[in-house]
Amino acid sequence: MGLIILEDILKATGGEILSKGADIFTRVCIDSRKIKHGELFVPLKGRKNDGHEFLLDAIKTGNGAFVSIKPERQITDKTIIFVKDTLKALQDLACFMRLKRNIPVIAITGTNGKTTTKELTAEILGTEYKVLKNEGNLNNHIGLPLSLTNLTQEDEAIVLEMGASGRGDIKQLCKIALPDYGILTNIGYAHISGFGNIETIRSTKLEMLEFVKTVAVNFDDKFMVEGISSSKFNGELIYYSAKEISDVYAKDIKLREKGLNFEMHIKGKESIRIESSISGIFNIYNILAASSIAYKIGIPLKNIQKAVKSFTGVPMRLEYSYIDGVTFIKDMYNANPDSVQGALEELSRTKKKRAIAVLGDMLELGSYAEEAHRNIGRILSKLNIDIFIAVGTLMKTASDEFKGTVYTSDTASEAGKILSKILKEGDSVLIKGSRGMGMEKVMEELCCTV
């Protein structure tokens, strides 16, 4: 457990003490319903509520709080720190804590594979170091600094996933975390409604280059490589590839029904056979990305090999399960054109009898949405998918392009009912869609009926 000292809080934020209680806090909490004894409450302003409304409830349990609105009644037994902006104070505290420790910070961004690459990087570094990482998907301007405030004296490395929904987001996160190393996974059309075009997505992801000294880059993403070549980055580039000889590359790739293995080569140095229980060609890229930076930091190849072999994947990301002779591929956390195509290719590759795709709308695609969904329908036909269950208004447009058997539904629950009626032993089923579509409800409905 970390310890956050009042003296450091005041130095980081320039805050004013309104009342004095505890000098030390165990961690930061932004949810008054979850706060525990010893924690510091940070009330944030959301779209519907202002955390200041719950201040008194929070400090009944917690040891203190930031405030940007002075309490109406005097508080005497808890530490209350007045700041101009509570979110900025949280971010400043996170940056201050990071700067107190001279340990490597690795930042990971890109359109697809960020979370899996983050978890793999942390797993590999964990063979030599005690690693702090952002849990789950806490990768934005709130989640990332919140994760950093969990830093302890025992931590020896930091691995941070960075998400973006608009221009400047990666730059803001890098100003907080000040990373030494970076990983760029790929560039695609996710959340394009917040960017306007693919070029802005690329330039936003490449904002990382202003901060890192070394960056691992997917050499097979030529659009991203072109952007880096046009940038003013003069640090160290480590290219990784599953198709060509590069700084770190894969050869003799073997994809199994579940899992994969390949030879990983460090150009001009050494190589080792990598075995993994996670599936999909895209996960080879995630393994190469994590391994590239870990090897640069000094992790031996044998440690990388061991860590990758023990890594079991991330829940709701290409997660396999087997029920009554049916193979389910659950990739329900999120969806964009590239990730859906990759998951469909995996379904087509591993199917034994019928392949069924249950796909929910891909959200936040702006003006590109209709064409992106129609293209998914074409991909379904090209990959010889047998049955398509389209969930949502946008996926119904994809069904217009599909040549096989189609069912349409408005909700994931309805899709689950349809699926339960048509399933046969030996079927392979992919379930995927944007987070807002709640595609996990397909399995919830299904498990009630099979």
Image: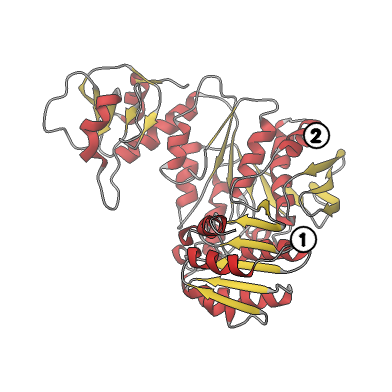
The relative height of residue 26 versus residue 323 in the rendered view (above or below) is above
**Residue drawn at 46 percent across, 56 percent down:** 165
* Residue at image location 57% in from the left, 53% down from the top: 206
Which amino acid lies under the numbered mark 1 shown in the image of this protein? Answer: Thr
Screen quadrant of the C terminus:
bottom right
Dot 2 crowding, Cα within 10 Å, few <14, some 14–19, many 20+: many
- Element type at mark 2: helix
Where does residue 162 sit, x and y in percent of width and height?
Answer: 52, 46
Horizontal side of 382 relative to 432 (left or right) equals right
Task: Say which of 161 and 420 sits in front.
Answer: 420
Disc 1 on helix, strand or loop?
Answer: helix
What is the CA distance from the residue labelled 2 to the residue labelled 1? Answer: 30 Å
Q: Residue at coordinates 73% horizontally, 55% vertically from top-left?
A: 280
Q: Amino acid at mark 2?
A: Leu
The reply to whether residue 368 is in sight is no
Reading the image, the residue beneath label 2 is 301
Q: Residue furthest left?
A: 73
Which x, y percent locates residue 260? 79, 49
Q: Residue furthest front?
A: 449
Q: Quadrant of residue 39?
A: top left
Q: Which residue is mark 1?
A: 350
